[in-house]
Image: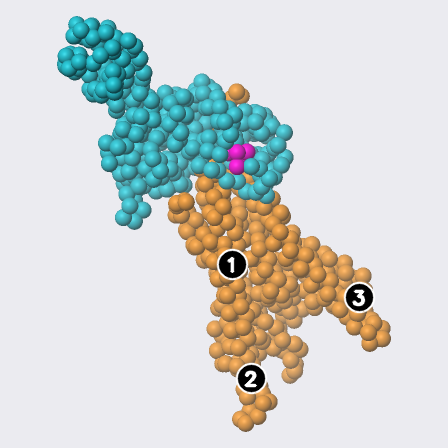
Chain colours: A cyan, B orange
Amino acid sequence: MSLAIETIDLTKRYGALVAVNKLNLRVEKRTIHGFLGPNGAGKTTTIKILVGLLKPDGGRAIVLGEEVRVDDPRARLKIGYMPELPRFPKHLKAWEILDIYGRMYGMPTQERKSRINRVLEIVGLKGRENSFIGEYSKGMQQRLGIAQALLSEPELIILDEPTLGLDPVGMVNVREIIREVMREGSTVFLSSHLLSEVEQICSHVSVIHRGVCLASGPLKNVIGKIAGSAILEIEVTEISSGILEAVKSLPFISNLQVDGNKMIIEVNADGDIRPDISQAITKSGGVIVSMNMRMRSLEEAFMQLIMKSR
Amino acid sequence: MDTSCLREGKNPRIIDQIAAIIKYELLWNIRKKKFLGVLVAAFVATTLTLFLPVILSHINNVALESKPDYVITNSGLGNLMIFLFALVTIMNSISGEFESGTIITLLTKPVSRTVILVGKIIAAFITISAAYTLLYIYMVVGGIAIYGPQENLHLIPLCILGDILSTFVWASLILALGSLSKNTILTAVTSIIIFLAMLIGASIIAVFTESAWILHYLPGSGAIGYLKAESSATYTGSISTGTDNISKMIIQYVLHPSANVTYIKISRVQGGSAGIFKELYAEPLSLVLSRSLIVALMYIITLTLISWYAFKHSQVLE
């Protein structure tokens, strides 16, 4: 599988603080890859290295097959980047700044015009393109940030907290935009503190903490790998030690807690194990009142992973 | 979606990118309140220069004489205006981008930092040239209207070039400070202190010490010299010989190519308040002018290279 982003032992220090610590990251092409981590985990530092804003102290970063270096314009031709809380010169109008950026990409006049119109339409700023950016709300600046990242139809779009400052409708729109650009063949690499958002739109995820990648891969695999594949809640008429022993003895049970007549079971298996558990309880003389199975959320998996690493 | 030139693998031309940066910067410059404020102040100062003799002649009830050399004699913007134009045009050109965070979007576009810096410098050149051209046009039109037909107006483009060169000595210093500190207030305060130190220090050194030669190699107003035609025994006027006064020196050189510049020290008479003048040394105006031009260019080149190095190697931490 060809990679859009690859980091090999990537390291960045700020004095004594190691912000990124031998980070190994692999982002496959044509995926929406979430980059998760608590505040100060090293997400933005990593992204800044990937777009050439920071120089790493060690290791390598390869983006779309090219080694990343500070001040290498060629490498940035195929990348669209939206920083966290993007800022633009307040004295310029949205159309003016997008036109200037388009010129920097070498887009011919006609293509530039149609592309600017298109991205303004995508982010919902059509009709406001001739207002000064200084008059824009934070949410509008955020939309403009996405517009400029999409302007050149990049192969790789890197978004740092793309929905920060947006209202719920704006957040839904951004998710739609991200899905749309992925469908058109781009790779999207996004960092977000909103785990539910990553869960909704990302196909792949990497979890970073204290500059180290704790888990990476397809979303379902990461969740399953971190915290078991599912949680089963079974209510019986009466819990006995025999029932508990029978359930515990099953090979795919990783944890069991009792709450009144309810058993909360962490299950670590790929297939549907409900018939096996049901049989074990019935054989031990138990009567099942209800059985609910739910997948762990990314949030639960993420919290567990972070707690483990502390 | 449309098929973009990028998907087809084309590369942008550097000339287009420089044009983009120039547009980016020019739109900023002409919308800066500080810049517009200094431009208005310069027009007010020019208006005063033009009308003050008119007002005085009315007050004194004396008829205003035609002065064919009025414009050329009063050409040259003066130290303060030159410094202020440099300051307001370029002080936040680099540091302001870092402070506001706009540098992040700019540096992640496929443009090299060298191109960004070159574009910004060209934009500053265009802005300052346009402002000075407007001011000189106003001065010439006003001069002709008030004082009658003017002589030597063909020297006005040289005056503009001289003033631009003088401005760029300060502009490159301010740009270097901004690129190194990435802090606009620090840049502005430091450059104002340097400007005032040069202005006040130069006057003290030039008038009261015998070390006027030091001022030949510093930016600013420089040493004050007294002009004397080669054949004449009397001084025809004084002239500041620093990098701020290149336009005036150019005019004097074109009008009096064989003139000499004499440097004078003032000493206090023992026990009294009166001063005595002591001639230190004299040198040809051609030498003074060419030295000032070389010193100005050396400052511009050196400080611009420092800016380029600092900007090229800066990292965006915030």
Q: Is B18 left, or right, of A43 in this rendering?
A: right
Label 1 amino acid? Ala
In the picture, the disc for residue B266 is 2
Looking at the image, which residue is at 73% across and 65% down? B48
Residue B154 shows in this picture:
no
What residue would you read off at disc 3?
A: B147
> Is residue B301 depicted above or below B106 in this figure?
below
**Which numbered disc flags the more N-terminal residue, 2 or 1?**
1
Looking at the image, which residue is at 25% across and 10% down? A237
What element does badge 1 sit on? helix
Q: Which label sits in the foreground, 2 or 1?
A: 1
Q: Position of residue B317 (x, y in %)?
A: 39, 45
**Quarter of the C terminus of chain A within the rendering:** top left
**Chain to which the residue tagged by mark 2 belongs:** B
Looking at the image, which residue is at 57% across and 53% down? B89
In the picture, the disc for residue B188 is 1
**Quarter of the N terminus of chain A within the rendering:** top left
Q: Position of residue A149 (x, y in %)?
A: 48, 31
Q: Which residues are magenta?
A: A138-142
Q: Nearer the viewer, residue B19 or A136?
A: A136
What element does badge 2 sit on? strand
Looking at the image, which residue is at 51% across and 69% down? B197
Quarter of the figure with residue A95: top right
